Amino acid sequence: MFEWRWFVGLGLALAAVFGATNPASAGVLDASWTAPATKSDGSTLTDLGSYRVYYSTSATPCPGVTFFTVASSTATPPANQTVNFRLTGLTTGSTYNVSVTAVDTSGNESACSSVASAVAQVDIAVTPAGTTSFGNINIGSFATQTFTVQSTRSGTITGTASVPAPFTIVSGSPFTLVGTGATATVTVRFTPISAVLSSTNVSFSADGDTLTRLVTGTGGTTGPALTVSKAGAGSGTVTSSPAGISCGATCSTAFTTGTVVTLTAAPAAGATFTGWSGGCTGTGTCTVTMNAATSVTAAFVQSSSSFPLTVTKSGTGSGTVTSSSAGISCGATCSTALTTGTVVTLTPAPAAGATFTGWSGSCTGTGTCSVTMSAARAVMATFAISSSSSGSFTYRPLVTQSTVVKAVHITELRKAINAARRRNGLAASTWTDATLTAGSTTLKAVHITELRTALNAVYTRLGRALPTYTDPTLVAGHTKPKAAHVQELRNAVSALP
């Protein structure tokens, strides 16, 4: 047994709360305590393994499901050794209660220490706080603005700044702040490439905190404009190199004088590109040198000798659709143009663990689908997961703050996710601690992170929005796998074809 003489001190002398202007920012708390040095019988403690720092907005954080694990620097702490730890990822402006336990090398945990409370704050402040405008900047030129990052806590803070194009970080990242009030300057550059309004966030990150500042700028129209229009009954797109035209949506933009722009026309299924007019001629790519405002027209016609056949798939199951004549292998190719009058037979093939439940659109029923190409045709094939392949999980469902996450839960998810990856054309994932032993293997944040990564790849392949997760960022050595983490993964993998 441990003998405790606890002192837990949280950083109470903090700067102002910045959550009001940065509601998504994460707060931190600094905790310190005196390490135990003796056992209850007075003998020297020789097997201290780690600490658990429990935290919660409820009055009694310990025992609880939210804690950080802190390794002990020594198994035999000297008398009056002070241990310091920073809790990160907290909600800025919220009051947290914190208590600490010690865990010996055999996994035995001490009683909870007394509770200390404090308000979570951010590590850094960033000025200016509002929107920073770069104004109108000529294409080919650039402008810079500076931001000041200030430490709001004692100690050393390291961080980075980042921003997407057409903005860049010129200097000041990464930055190091030593002591309360220390400052660093971050310089951001705006380099417009087209005559459009650009608006994005500069992100400042340190110790798990992220503050954002909005920046805007507009590219000047000093260069000549290139305008693309489309004509004809067919459909298609026109894109440019360098970027600027995507028509589609953006059919006019300004380029720096002298820029050589190449336009590429791409007809849609069942359509034909018949050529350029205006600033270009012919049916190949269109190249224009922007010494003056230029207009180009791309003509697309619907082919009178062919019509598009488009196949889509729906449902929770997976499978393929192939056609009797070459063109459809869906799978990969789900649309093709076929000569007028062609009779096409489509055949569904459910994947292992799935069933074909029927056609909709230009076909109905559950057999093969025959269509005559006298017009554009669209067919949907629906596949469902077989009831025998839906899988089962131990202790279902898991109950947050009640069910203890076990090795079997992780092992089951690994099998289910790898099965989903194989069904959807992905290789099986490999895992840290390939064999998890009940009652022996310590479950880690990396086990949950790997499962999320492997599962997200399936959602990306299917073009689906990624699942959302509790504790989106799991910190190795700090975040403990929770029932919520496991249940979310179960729900997400069960929803896959």
Image: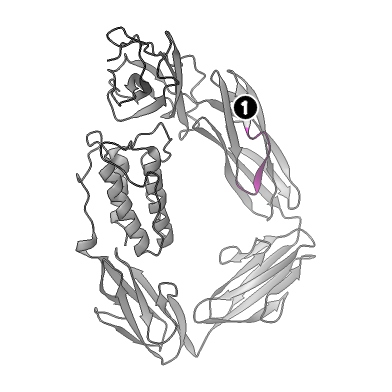
Check the image and report above or below for 425 versus 57.
below
Is residue 148 covered in magenta? no
Question: Can you give x and y, in whole percent of width and height, for residue 95 in the image?
Answer: 38, 22
Of residues 118 and 18, the one nearer the viewer is 118
Of residues 181 and 249, the one nearer the viewer is 181
Q: Is residue 362 visible in this depiction of the protein?
A: no
Question: Can you give x and y, in whole percent of width and height, for residue 293 in the image?
Answer: 75, 66
Magenta residues (range)? 164-174
Look at 30% across and 54% down and name the residue there: 415
Query: Under tag 1, what secondary structure?
Result: strand
Question: Can you give x and y, in whole percent of width and height, for residue 131 in the image?
Answer: 59, 37
Side of 235 relative to 401 (left or right)? right
Of residues 350 and 148, the one nearer the viewer is 350
Quarter of the figure that contains the C terminus: bottom left
Check the image and report above or below for 161 versus 281.
above
To which quarter of the image does residue 35 belong? top left
* Tag 1 residue: 176
Of residues 382 and 414, the one nearer the viewer is 414
Question: Can you give x and y, in whole percent of width and height, for residue 481 in the image?
Answer: 33, 37
Q: Is residue 347 visible in this depiction of the protein?
A: yes
Look at 49% across and 14% down and name the residue there: 13
Callout 1 amino acid = Thr
Quarter of the figure that contains the N terminus: top left
Q: Residues within 10 Å of mark 1 (few under 14, many from 20)?
A: some
